[in-house]
Amino acid sequence: MSTTTLDVEKTKKDAEKAPTKAKKPAKQAAKITRFGLWRERAAQKRAERASERGWLSVLSWTVVLRLLVITADYLLAMLTATVVIPQLALWLHQQSGLGDPGLLSDASIAMWLLPLASIVALVVVGEVVLMRRMWRWATERLDKIKGVDAETEPTSAQTTNRTSKKNNRKRSK
């Protein structure tokens, strides 16, 4: 036999004797798949869905939802300004007894204008809260369409720990 044949046979025997990677037991592999790779697979699926929809679909949904919220905000503000506040003023005027011509302007301010200003301020605050909530709702819907998971991105409030607050206390002597 030639030396090349001996070398080839020797490398074949060495390859057979070489330790092979031990396969993980089926339960351990299932455990890794179930717990370790589940989030990665979910992220891949979200990315695939987002790429299938395309940017045009996301853009169109963004335009539709934002226009819907802006239109609802406009209608709410106009309804409040043209119907609700005048009706409140009329009701307050009737309830305050300002029909008597002998009342002074100070009395009309105290009995009618200040309560009306308070009610209008409360209505405006309620409207702003409602408008912000609608905007957040639209943002949440857009995040779902884009495939962004809000739970995977921790906010600054979630990442702070209490131990750092304890370390900043003054020590007593």
Image: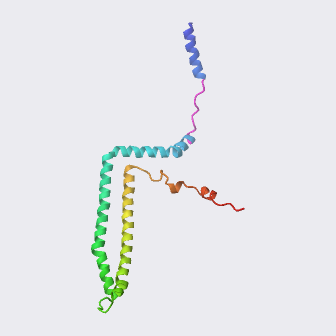
Q: Where is residue 147 in the image (x, y as percent from the top left)?
A: 40, 49
Q: Where is residue 81 in the image (x, y as percent from the top left)?
A: 29, 72
Q: Name the foreground residue: 76 vs 141.
A: 76
Magenta part of the chain: 18-27
Relative to 90, 169 lies left or right:
right
Q: Name the foreground residue: 104 vs 169.
A: 104
Q: In this view, does 103 lie above or below 33?
A: below
| Residue 163, image quadrant | bottom right
| Quadrant into which the N terminus falls | top right
| Quadrant into which the C terminus falls | bottom right
| Residue 45, image quadrant | top left
Q: Is residue 10 above or below residue 108?
A: above
Q: Position of residue 153 (x, y in %)?
A: 47, 51
Q: Name the foreground residue: 3 vs 103.
A: 103
Q: How is the image coloured?
A: rainbow
**In magenta segment, residue 26:** yes
What's the residue at 58%, 28% (across, down)? 20
Q: What secondary structure do most residues of the magenta stretch adopt?
A: loop
Q: Is residue 142 above or below residue 11?
A: below
